[in-house]
Image (cartoon, grey):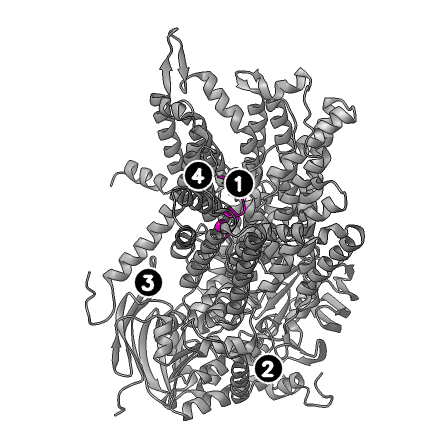
Amino acid sequence: MSPVPLLAFEAIEKSFGAVRALRGVSFELRAGEVHALLGENGAGKSTLIKVATGAHAPDAGTLVVAGERLARLDPAAAKAHGIACIYQQPALFPDLTVAENLALRLEPAGGWRRVRWGERRRRAEALLRQAGAHVPPDREVRELSMPEQQLVEMAGALGAGARIVLMDEPTASLTQPEQERLFAAVRALKASGVGIIYISHRLDEIFALADRVTVLRDGATVGSRTAAELDEPDLIRLMVGREVDRLYPPPAAPAGEVVLDVRGLGCAAAGVHDVSFTVHAGEVFALAGLVGAGRTELARVLFGLTPADAGEVRLQGERVALGSPRAAMAAGLAYVPEDRRRHGVVPELPVAQNLTLAAHRAIFPGGWLRAGPEQRCAAELIARLDIRPAEPAAPVTSLSGGNQQKVALGRWLATNPRVLILDEPTQGVDVGAKGEIHRRIRELAAGGLAVILISSDLPEVLGMGDRIGVMRGGTLREILTGGTPAPAVMAAALGRAGKGAA
Amino acid sequence: MKSYARELAVAAVLGLLLVVLAVWAPAFFEPAPLRSLLAREAPTLVVACGMALVILTRQIDISVGSQFSACSVAAGLLAAAGWPMGLVLPAAVALGAVLGAVNGALVAGLGLPSIVVTLATMVTLRQGLNLARQGEFVNLPDGVQWLGLGQSAGQGMLLLVAGAVFVTLALALRHLAAGRHVYAVGSDAEAARLAGLRPRRVTLAAFMLLGACAGLAAVMNVVQSPQVQPLAGSGLELKVIAAVVVGGVAISGGRGRLGGVFLGLLLLAFISPALTHLHIEAYWEKAIQGAIILLAVLADAGRKEDSP
Amino acid sequence: MTRGAELIRAGWRRHEVRLLAVLVAEWLVFYYCGTSVNRHGVVVGFGTLERQGDILRHSCEIGLLALVLTPVILTAGIDLSVGSLLGLCAVVFGQLWHDAGLSVGAAAALTLVAGALAGGLNAGLIAGLRLPPLIVTLGTYSLFRGLAEALTRGAVTYTDFPAGFLALGQDRALGLPVQAWAFLAVAAAVWVLVHRTMTGRAFRVIGFSPEGARYAGLPVRRTLALAYVLAGVVAALAALIYTARIGQAKADAGTGYELSAIAAVVLGGTSIFGGRGSVTGTLLGVAAIAVLQNGLATIPVVIRLNAAGEIAGLLTGALLLGALSAEAAAKVLSQLRRRRQSAPGPNPVAP
């Protein structure tokens, strides 16, 4: 039916040490389609992307680009074949300007030519306009926000005249309007005959954008389908290979006494001001808002990473000073940060040492390391959170994303906190593990913990939050009751109902 | 946005030093001694330019002092054996490039940390030289010193060569695609790889260029005296790295310009003669150099806090 | 495979075991080549107890520096200033005793305080202001040596220390050189600190991921500061031992020691990128270099060439390069082999 596919994967295999990341992946990308690639975390999507861009050489199998069988593919050859990739974490040069970043992507590889600075600048301006990015080309990339960096990546792909664009969770950190702009750019690319492989965990996006869907499970393709013939439960079934009965567990018990009482909290350095709210024992207090609204910044202020300069915090009625993470921990706060690999865990360290890292005062009295208590503590947490593989001595790098997240969570459970702040706990986590993490959060709340849940995933906020705080412009604007309809929450986050956005 | 704050700060300190000298020790500006001073520092500038390249790629080379010594001895021996300077010069430059290539291959090819690799090659090379020469000086035949041009013309020639190397490299770093690749690799090697550049090749080339610069500088140093000391380059690496850092090149790679390196080198080079002219004991030189390096990093810290 | 063979294979993968094998091999070579009987029928050379004691005596100062550089390098830091600080502390000690007329004990105590203060300067800049350790300690490398030269006007040498003090560097106690006991005590303390305390684990965590350490609530600044202050204090101790062994205090004491100490630490298997390494490895690294340097001086051919120091330096550099490249090359080779075995594409790759 279709002519030659733009890109075909034929039985691609790739292993890292003992881990078989890909064990026979085959599918085709046609011109002018958005092809969604789906799968649980650790199913091999990111590895496949790296094979297609030449960053990893496959151990077996063949890549066919526009009918041409390629024996070898390195990044330069991939670029020459019109393959471009927009990564989750943009692969840009922080020390160089936007214009130069684009130029390095687009200009021929040879070193012996003169740099035409004026031309670079003009071309960058044109491409940025095309991608809908309001970014001055002379800014250094280190000064840009993450979404701005992604738009620079988009501009790069547009400029490369790419025929094949790979997008690895491009919306993970985008705000709603930025997302819309990105979708428009994707549709424009598609209309011009480009084939797009689109990876995302957000099913609504896939139904909004994709023509066809290929599902990966355990490093192999389960099958390719037309998006129109699928619905959400079908997709989830294909991905996890089992029925996922209910996504959000119901609240177990009515909320108890006030545990955390925040009054007029502010921190000029973090851009947070005048935040007041309370959280009760057994309650999940969800924090909604757009990226840049100040939710992570608020969490960092509470946890003492950027100490507050205004307001007060009371824990069970007692006023506490939160000047450092250590002070916050001593007061009974725990913070599972958004960036798991950089902040949440120490990837090179074994699971057991990661699990006991925050609780060492209790486990190692006087600061002397002791193997027995450490092993007992780790074994208990591994069993309680069902961390797999249950191998305390394995480095955290050998675990999947969902299990790494459990380690990041387990570290704080070991400290017996009274308030638990979770920052995007299910970002980049597959559907199956997501449900499990939601169940755990409920269990913890039922055990009397006060939970603050920061999430950009609106269904998660609605499904988990007993009350929903909406942040905008660095402060808490509204507190909504659980069960508020989604459009109302979104409107509050956007500031459409009344006052203009800050 | 580009900022020339560092260049301006170093230039201001340098200017202040020159004003102080002009008022209290105008003898400093007498042409002949000043030209001698600059000629003595000319080889250092050449090496500093090469070092800036390596540091821009986020590496470091502490073996340049040993490379410089090895090239000096080799150049001296070849000249003593009757080779014309027209052959001695390319031979020394080639030897430097080969020595640099060894470092570069170990760092770029095997992915070893550059500070350890060059520490090892520094020790190996220096002890090899000690073993081969046993501290013996090489006596140069007539006509080698000042290339037979006489002192003032020879010194002028050296300044010209150093200036040419400096200008060429500075222009190449700014206006040649290959120069921008150096910045790209130092800023983020993985991103450079994904953009289709070849970071390993760029890193290897930077080390080789530094080696070649060390070879050229060695010859520029050899022609200034009638003898070649076997360990002429000891301590050169730290002097050069200090100039690069004071000049505002970030040790984390990808940031900095050669103009700053030039000013940084002048500032560090003027301290010792300035002390002599101002009748301060010269023993303070190293302490003052150390203090200047610390002030330069402190200034970096202050700048970091200004930007988000 | 039998269990014993498996154990040996597993052990061989440990860096310390391989280094121990190198050390034993070195020792055996020197024992057979460097020991002889002179014309009075007395055994001389490498195989004598006296020579073994000398090896210990001569490796104490660099050994001490290597020991305290281990925690610093574990945090992914570096301290280039320890050699210069040794020189500065030697001069300070000489001045306090000779010029200020303090007793040896008081002068020594104040020297240790001076070392702590100098280490504190590094610590303040690196841990407090988060400046890059390579550049900060490059600056203090120059500063400390410069201060030593300025204090002595580049010329003054302090000598004629009392015999009681010189005993620290020249006598024996319980069969070992006196300073060896100090070295062993510091070695034990550093080993316990690095391998048996939470602070030791914090060194590693900071080396792997300073941000991760902060988010886990570890005292990052305090831990980093401790590593650099400790380096300062022990450099001062090394200065006292050096002065007692040589019998004089000069501004150029300990020149180049920082590089020898770093070489020993890296040879001992501690990663310059931080996080990985052990104190045992460092001790073996120090021993391997010390035996090489002293052993060479007992081999007749080398004695005739009068080049023991140079050959030892050459071999140390080669050993370091070899140890580093062997591991990296093995990794690269195995990658290449795997790629060749499973080269994708229809065209078989010609060998």
Residue with the mark numbered 2: A135
Residue with the mark numbered 3: A15
Q: Give the amino acid type for the residue marked by disc 1 in the picture.
A: Leu
Residue with the mark numbered 4: B129
Q: Is residue A96 left or right of residue C129?
A: left
Is A308 in front, or is A392? Answer: A308
Tell me if mark 1 has few (under 14), some (14-19) or many (20+) residues whose alpha carbon lies within 10 angstroms of its own.
many
Residue at mark 3 shares a chain with residue at mark 2: yes
Tell me if mark 3 has few (under 14), some (14-19) or many (20+) residues whose alpha carbon lies within 10 angstroms of its own.
some
Q: Give the amino acid type for the residue marked by disc 3 in the picture.
A: Ser
Q: Give the amino acid type for the residue marked by disc 2 in the picture.
A: Val
Q: Give the amino acid type for the residue marked by disc 4 in the picture.
A: Leu
Evaluate if marks 1 and 3 touch, with contact meaning CB atoms under 8 Å apart: no
Mark 3 and mark 2 lie on one chain; the one further toward the N terminus is 3
Is A54 in front, or is A476? Answer: A54
Residue at mark 4 shares a chain with residue at mark 3: no
Marks 1/3: CA–CA distance = 40 Å
Marks 4/1: CA–CA distance = 18 Å
Bounds of the magenta segment: B217-232
Residue A221 pos. (x, y %)? 31, 75
For the point 34% across and 79% down, the residue is A81
Residue A353 seen in this snapshot:
yes
Tell me if mark 2 has few (under 14), some (14-19) or many (20+) residues whose alpha carbon lies within 10 angstroms of its own.
some
Residue with the mark numbered 1: C259
Q: Is mark 4 on a helix, strand or loop?
A: helix
Q: Quadrant of residue C99?
A: top right
Evaluate if marks 4 and 1 touch, with contact meaning CB atoms under 8 Å apart: no
Marks 2/4: CA–CA distance = 56 Å
Evaluate if marks 2 and 4 touch, with contact meaning CB atoms under 8 Å apart: no
Image quadrant in which the C terminus of chain C is located = bottom left
Q: What element carries label 3?
A: strand
Disc 3: host chain: A
